[in-house]
Image (cartoon, grey):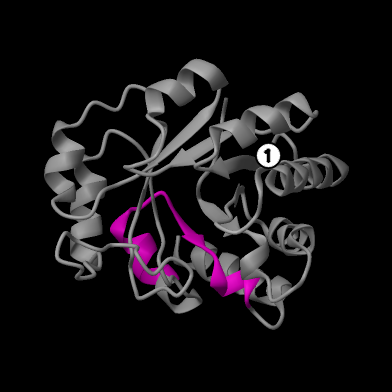
Amino acid sequence: MAFSIEKYLVVGPENTLGRPVSDIVRDAVEAGFTCVQIRSKVASAKEMIALAVKVSDLLKTMGKSDEVTLLINDRLDVALAAREAGAKVDGIHVGQTDIPVSVCRKYLGEDAVIGLSAPTGDLTRYVREGNFKDVDYFGAGPLHETATKRDCGLDDEGNIIYRTLDEIKKLVSISPLPITIGGGVKAEDMKSLVETGVDGFFVVSAIASAEDPKAAAEELVRRWEVAK
């Protein structure tokens, strides 16, 4: 399927300051976001399935089901169960230690969107030498410190490795797949990210924890579009 990771919201119930996830998603999509990933480390499988169905129904009501890509983080079981319950789940995003992408492809089908978090360490070599036949895009980061995923970018010694703009630019030049960058990304980063040639950005707190999520999403989109 055609998909866009250009403006990408990652969100779960623990990120929204007690507000409904669907309200945050609505604000982001109305502002122009093109991809939504449901991610939670605290919600049960049943809660995640219900959340996926609710967001899928919302996108349908908004007339955005074919324009906004809906993904589930990590949980192949949730993605399959949500589809069984009638949700239009387009695919999954997994990390290096999660279920293999080949298994995701087997069960979600050839048309599914499968994203893979790039590893900490030598990304350039990884991207140049890896076999990514079952992957549709890379997620990489962190660009900055992020409170929503404190283990993001940790190396074997427990040090955080941030991604520099020069490194991102090099990755873009050699990557066989689209790349989206996240990890503490803010509106003021949009111009610099666009200049790297990266395909998109992803955010959690910048929208989900904002006092006014709609205004925050609109500002991110505005700055990205102006920089392009």
Which residues make up the magenta segment?
190-209
Q: How many marks?
A: 1
In the image, 5 versus 159, the foreground residue is: 159
Q: Is 196 one of the magenta-colored residues?
A: yes
Question: Residue at left 14%, top 65%?
Answer: 157
**Judging from the image, what secondary structure is the residue with disc 1 in?**
loop
Task: Residue 185: give x, y in percent of width and height.
Answer: 44, 70
Q: Quadrant of the N terminus?
A: top right
Q: Quadrant of the C terminus?
A: bottom left
Task: Residue 226: give x, y in percent of width and height.
Answer: 51, 67
Q: Residues within 10 Å of mark 1 (few under 14, many from 20)?
A: some
Residue hosting label 1 = 67
Question: Residue at left 43%, top 65%?
Answer: 149
24 left or right of 70 in image: right
Say which quarter of the image contains residue 173: top left
Question: Residue at left 83%, top 41%?
Answer: 57
Residue reaching furthest to the right: 61
Tell me if I can see residue 110 in this picture. no
